[in-house]
Amino acid sequence: MKLAVIGGGGFRVPLIYRALCSGTFAGLVNEVCLYDADSSRTAAIARVARDLPLPHGAQPPRLTVNERLEDALAGADVVFVAIRPGGAGGRVLDERVAIAEGLLGQETVGAGGLSYALRSIPQMLTVAEAIVAACPDAWVINFTNPAGIITGALQPLLGGRIIGICDSASGLVRRASIAVGVPLPPGSLTGVDYVGLNHLGWLRALEYDGGDLLPALLADSSRLAVFEEGRVFGPQFLHMLGALPNEYLFYYYFHAEARRSVAAAPETRGESIIRQQDGLYPDLLSTDRPFAAWEAARRSREEGYLAEARTAEESRDEADLAGGGYEQVALTVMRALVRDEPAELILNIRNGNAIPQLPAGAVVEIPARVTGHGVRALPVGTPTPHQLGLISQVLGVEQDVIAAVVQGDRSLALRAFALHPLIDSAHTAQRLLRGYEKALPGLRSLWR
């Protein structure tokens, strides 16, 4: 079986390859083929993958590199897509244009996320068209952010064969289940009620042995203090909310604090990544220890994740720093699809009738069961008015962004900026869109 990784020069790709070399995912594929628009990045990451320290007896799949997208896709059974149009430099512009308007400068949330989507959808549509031509029966697992928007944009081309993934919701469930003392078996969501969109969702129940353990967790300050979301939101707020929010809801519930923290920082997250990785890829091509160089950079990058939500004294949990998020979710999905080994995960999928108050074609982030026949939504409870209100507002924005690109309609892009809950006025939205068009000239070519 062949796995094609589009965006094969991505920083996290070695985590995928390492997981396929030993352990529960060993033997799942025969070939991992890397493709990236920047061939030098692919060559660097391939060196890291071949230098991975593996346990005795590991049998790594064949690693190949292609310089043409069509060749990489040919014969693929599964396609992972994780591209970043514009690179880290584009991310910095997403952040800085928002900050200049006094807004939150964040990669996937708010103004920066909308700009990122406008930049990414066109290239992802090109990738989807190539998949339809080269391997129409392949399963497509989308890592590209903003994951919900991108997955929604590609569904008309790929139908039910595309699944969007993110590790933040799965990580929340894992951390909460450990805190209540009933760690869930991998790939099982029995008793879990989670509802929302990508980077905007809530864990509302953790049922075990006939009872819901979440209320007691929300009332226990000491147990909340042992995991990231408990510390980020604080026990008083969580008790009042009656649910555990996805960590990205920090940007909504503590918007003013997040905005001030990001604006006051000496560098944005994107600038930090550029600084941390400046020269890294050339070094990976020249050093005789590519894995060690990559691993040091990976740890540094993980330590800075969501730093604005933590005090200077707080650090991320060691389990989160060790990796094992995105790739574990993606490979669990892949194993369920190709081996018909059922698994339950929180995924970005077509709503159907899972949340009746939302359009059937909307992409939502909810628990789902994956088998060799595809993906099926698991039952979720009705969202509260607060949850449904925020979901509906952000979903409307996301759908406008997709339509703006597909129809070439600038007015829809402007409406998306104007109606986003983290953008404070229609006048600001006008300045934002003009600012992004000036900083990212490619955006202007979208409009007909």
Image (cartoon, rainbow, N blue to C red):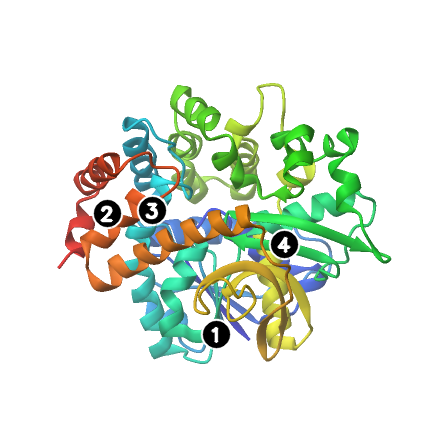
The amino acid type of the residue labelled 2 equals Leu
Mark sitting on residue 48: none
Picture quarter with the N terminus: bottom right
- CA gap, disc 1 to disc 4? 21 Å
Which numbered disc, 1 or 2, marks the residue closer to the eye? 2
Q: Which mark is residue 194?
A: 4
Mark 2 closeness class: few <14, some 14–19, many ≥20 residues within 10 Å: many
Q: Between disc 1 and disc 2, whose residue precedes?
A: 1
Name the residue carrying label 1. Answer: 160
Q: CA distance from mark 1 to mark 2?
A: 30 Å
Q: Residues within 10 Å of mark 3 (few under 14, many from 20)?
A: many
Q: What's the distance in space between the residues labelled 3 and 4, CA to CA?
A: 24 Å
Q: What residue sits right under mark 2 in the picture?
A: 414
* Quadrant housing residue 23: bottom right
For residue 145, side relative to residue 373 (left or right): left
Secondary element at image label 2: helix
Question: Which one is earlier in the sequence, the residue at label 4 or at label 2?
Answer: 4
Q: What SS does tag 3 mark?
A: helix
Residue that badge 3 annotates: 114
Q: x%, y% of residue 444?
A: 16, 49
